[in-house]
Image (tube, rainbow, N blue to C red):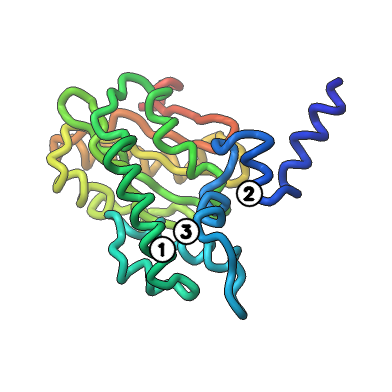
């Protein structure tokens, strides 16, 4: 029985997104696979996988919902496909966006990040919270191996200040799946914590996450 279950899990990767969704549910699809379903098919000299990958890179970098012109800048994305993607994003924003969700503990923040846990590079994120610790906005700050240059307090706090945030949760993914914080992770956390005290926007937690779960600096007594 255990062998069969393991086989099913491993075989998911061989299925196309629609088949995968039918067999296991839409929630198991990663972001690129969801986009491939929406895009439908590729074009000459531009596969659906390439279009979805380029589009995902664009969406990762955008701080707000992109307009049609921005979506159409991706090779293979014409007016029809861009309109479909824009409509899907706007519908989700209106009906299901997590703004206002109460974040009382690390477990409440992880669902805001889990869909980005399968990224192959490290990404650094901020979660702005209001005075009632309700979610305002989750944003990507940087992409690449974390260091003092790429995760600078100026960049981290720019948008939360604009949000008039009362508190902040920072987070980054570990593509390796190892959730243990590095020395650099600890150093960056201390620097951001010091900056938050000066700005009056305290860091409530730093989450390191991957598809299997998360590490909380707060829960582990490191913050």
Compare marks 3 and 2 and give the one earlier in the sequence: 2
Q: Is residue 131 above or below residue 36?
A: above
Residue at (23% x, 37% y) in the render:
136
Q: Nearer the viewer, residue 67 or 199?
A: 67
Q: At numbered mark 3, what does the secondary structure look like: helix, strand or loop?
A: helix
For this view, does 155 lie left or right of residue 3?
left
Q: At numbered mark 2, what does the secondary structure look like: helix, strand or loop?
A: helix
Q: Residues within 10 Å of mark 2 (few under 14, many from 20)?
A: many
Residue at (48% x, 37% y) in the render:
114
- Residue 58: mark in rendering: 1
Q: How many marks?
A: 3
Where is residue 135 drawn, in percent x and y? 26, 32
Quadrant (top left, top right, bottom left, bottom right) of the C terminus: top left
Q: Residues within 10 Å of mark 3 (few under 14, many from 20)?
A: some
Residue at (12% x, 40% y) in the render:
164
Check disc 3 and report the residue beneath it.
56
| Front label number (1 vs 2) | 2
Q: Is residue 134 above or below residue 33?
A: above
Where is residue 120 drawn, in percent x and y? 57, 53
Where is residue 183 drawn, in percent x and y? 48, 42
Q: Nearer the viewer, residue 58 or 203?
A: 58
| Front label number (3 vs 2) | 2
For this view, does 204 lie left or right of residue 212?
left
Check disc 2 and report the residue beneath it.
17
Asked whether the viewer can see residue 191, the reply is no
Where is residue 119 drawn, in percent x and y? 54, 50
For this view, does 10 lie left or right of residue 44?
right
For this view, does 74 lie left or right of residue 162?
right
């Amino acid at each position: 029985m255990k062998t069969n279950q393991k086989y099913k899990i491993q075989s998911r990767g061989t299925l196309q997104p629609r088949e995968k969704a039918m067999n296991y549910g839409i929630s198991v699809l990663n972001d690129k696979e969801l986009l491939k379903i929406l895009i439908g098919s590729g074009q000459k000299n531009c596969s659906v996988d390439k279009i979805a990958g380029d589009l995902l890179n664009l969406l990762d970098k955008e701080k707000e919902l992109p307009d049609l012109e921005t979506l159409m800048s991706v090779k293979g994305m014409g007016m029809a496909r861009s309109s479909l993607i824009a409509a899907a994003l706007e519908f989700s924003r209106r009906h299901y966006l997590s703004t206002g969700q109460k974040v009382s503990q690390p477990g409440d923040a992880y669902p805001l990040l889990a869909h980005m846990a399968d990224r192959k590079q490290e990404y650094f994120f901020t979660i702005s919270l209001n005075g009632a610790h309700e979610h305002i906005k989750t944003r990507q700050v940087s992409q690449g191996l974390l260091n003092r240059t790429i995760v600078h307090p100026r960049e981290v706090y720019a948008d939360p200040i604009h949000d008039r945030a009362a508190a902040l949760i920072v987070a980054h993914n570990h593509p390796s799946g190892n959730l243990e914080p590095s020395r650099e992770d600890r150093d960056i956390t201390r620097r951001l914590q010091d900056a938050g005290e000066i700005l009056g926007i305290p860091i409530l937690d730093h989450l390191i996450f991957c598809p299997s779960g998360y590490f909380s600096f707060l829960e582990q007594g490191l913050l």
